[in-house]
Image (cartoon, rainbow, N blue to C red):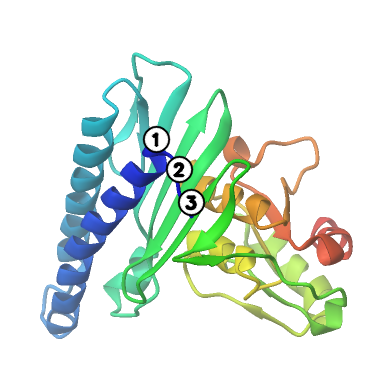
Amino acid sequence: MVGSANLNVMIKAARRAGRSLVKDFREVENLQVSMKGAGDFVSKADIAAEAILKEELVGARPNYGWLAEEGGEIAGTDPTRRWIVDPLDGTTNFLHGLPHWAISIALEYKGQIVAGVIYDPTKDEMFLAEKGQGAWMNETRLRVSGRSRMIESIFATGLPYGGRSDLPATLQDLARLLPACAGVRRWGSAALDLAYVAAGRYDGFWERRLNAWDLAAGDILVREAGGFVQPIDPKGNVIEDGEIIAANPSIFDPFAKAIRG
């Protein structure tokens, strides 16, 4: 894929932050057995990756706005464009030495996501999409799966933890969905879940109470790979509300019906 100048800036930033995180990830295993544990170290790794991304992205486009997990929101002199960034999606996996986490970068223009990059450095899988240009993983064009039967489909989600208030709704989702499908996966990175829907690895994904930086790049990846994306509440907004249903077109309606009850 021949991307725009902005997409190339995003790819370069993701690769540089990825190198930093992979180096830190190799240290996590050593810290697992220490008395203090790896938590503080991982927080520093996350902040360091965000600093790299900010240096690359804001350095290249100083007039764009900025929204990120660690650094919050900064208004740009160009009010129509902003970067939406998660330097480490899947922090708990990273903390436990599980090689399933990613960097997520999206570019928003006038309220619409127009480009997205999700980079999994441990597998060297770079998922990218631009509005009207399709979705790609490295050099391979992506397309959502072609499955049309729920019973043959697998879905991904996140499971609420630590007593979160959305646990009852998610348990109801699972009660409706599990009898009708081939399985549900919970791998701990919403960004990669959406990238996997775009790649046809999952047939669909849903989750509540996410943040804009968890969803933004994955949203355009799924759309550009031919998938459907909607908020769980049909009157809502995916990025603003942090609730999403994404799936291939053949399975979307029965899947959405199961989630919406």
Q: Which mark is residue 214?
A: 3
Residue behind mark 1: 83
Q: Are marks 3 and 2 in contact (CB under 8 Å)?
A: no
Marks 3 and 2, how far apart at CA: 10 Å
Q: Which mark is residue 106?
A: 2
Q: Are marks 1 and 2 in contact (CB under 8 Å)?
A: yes
- Name the amino acid, label 3: Asp
Q: Specify few, some or many for label 1: CA neighbours under 10 Å numbering under 14, 14-19, or 20 or more.
A: many
Residue 172 in percent (x, y) is at 77, 67
Residue at 72% of width from left, 36% of height from top? 236
Residue at 12% of width from left, 73% of height from top? 36
Residue 185 in percent (x, y) is at 61, 78
Residue at 30% of width from left, 78% of height from top? 96
Q: Specify few, some or many for label 3: CA neighbours under 10 Å numbering under 14, 14-19, or 20 or more.
A: many
Question: Along the horizontal axis of the image, is 149 left or right of 240?
Answer: right
Q: What is the secondary structure assignment of the residue under circle 2?
A: strand
Regarding residue 190, the answer to whether it shows in the image is: no
- Name the amino acid, label 1: Trp
Q: What is the secondary structure assignment of the residue under circle 3?
A: helix
Mark 1 or mark 3, which is nearer to you? 1
Mark 3 or mark 2, which is nearer to you? 2
- Name the amino acid, label 2: Ala
Regarding residue 10, the answer to whether it shows in the image is: yes
Q: Could you tell which of marks 1 and 3 lies nearer the N-terminus?
A: 1
Q: Nearer the viewer, residue 252 or 72?
A: 252
Q: Nearer the viewer, residue 93 or 170?
A: 93
Q: Could you tell which of marks 1 and 2 lies nearer the N-terminus?
A: 1
182 is higher (above) or lower (below) than 211: below
Q: Specify few, some or many for label 2: CA neighbours under 10 Å numbering under 14, 14-19, or 20 or more.
A: many
Marks 1 and 2, how far apart at CA: 6 Å
